[in-house]
Each structure stands twice: as structure tokens, then as C-alpha cells.
Image: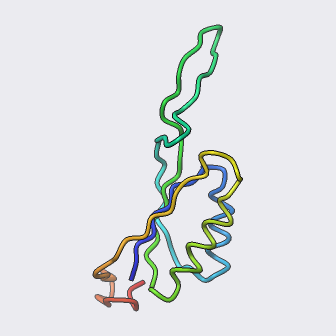
Amino acid sequence: MKLVVAIIKPFKLDDVREALHDIDVQGMTVTESKGFGRQKGHTEIYRGAEYAIEFLPKIRLEIAVSDDKLDSVVEAISSSAKTGKIGDGKIFVMPLEQTVRIRTEETGDIAL
């Protein structure tokens, strides 16, 4: 089992959700977050004053998947979140040692 963590642009969330739904991914956790990478933020002008926005709004997705679905999940996120511009995000894949469904106490891939 793997835990896929993806950082994407907020307006791409619906596209990513639909792409994951199309490949039968059952669930994910979505968190609003802020951060920066190579973008390093940007400056804006508000009422004549210029100020720097160092942390940009992002969406963090966490998806637990079985090993056999990993490649299709990464491909679905990558293709649906891509705009071709700086700041599209990142995908991280980490090992997931154990999963337990609390309601039924099922473990492993069955609990996903």
C-alpha cells in the first residue's frame, strides 16, 4: 500500500477529483494549505500599496492506494492537475505500512 500526497492549484481540484473517480479511487482527504516552491510568491498592489504574497494558496490531497493502482493514480493526478505553468505542484509517494477501517476492523488493502 502507498500514501500519495499531491500539492495542486486550488482551481484544479474538481478536475483531479473527476479523474480519480474515473479510475475508481474510493476516497481522499483534501486540505487547504499555503506554500511556495520555485514560484517564490508574487507581489500585488492593493489601494496603491505594493505588498508581497510569499505563501500561495494550494490544495493538499492525501490518497491511500493499493500498489496495483499506484501508477494509474499518479498519472490521473499528474495529467488532470497540469497547466504547463510554474506552480502546478508536486506528487509524493510514501509507503503505507498498515490500514485499519475503524467500523469493521478490516485491515490492509480491504480497508482501503
Q: How many marks?
A: 0
Residue 78 location, quadrant: bottom right
Question: Would residue 62 be found to the left or right of residue 75 on screen?
Answer: left
Residue 83 position, x and y percent, is 71, 53
Compared to residue 91, the image places residue 22 above or below, namely below
Residue 91 position, x and y percent, is 50, 63
Residue 75 location, quadrant: bottom right
Compared to residue 12, the image places residue 108 above or below, namely below
At 53% across and 22% down in the image, what residue appears? Answer: 52
Question: Would residue 40 be found to the left or right of residue 64 on screen?
Answer: right
Compared to residue 17, the image places residue 59 above or below, namely above
Question: Would residue 26 be found to the left or right of residue 110 on screen?
Answer: right
Residue 39 position, x and y percent, is 56, 38
Which quadrant is home to the N terminus? bottom left
Of 47 and 106, which appears nearest the observer? Answer: 47
At 66% across and 60% down in the image, what residue appears? Answer: 14
Way the structure is coloured? rainbow
Residue 48 position, x and y percent, is 65, 8
Which quadrant is home to the C terminus? bottom left
Of 68 and 63, which appears nearest the observer? Answer: 68
Toward the front, the furthest residue is 38
Question: Would residue 3 be found to the left or right of residue 27 on screen?
Answer: left
At 60% across and 67% down in the image, what residue appears? Answer: 77
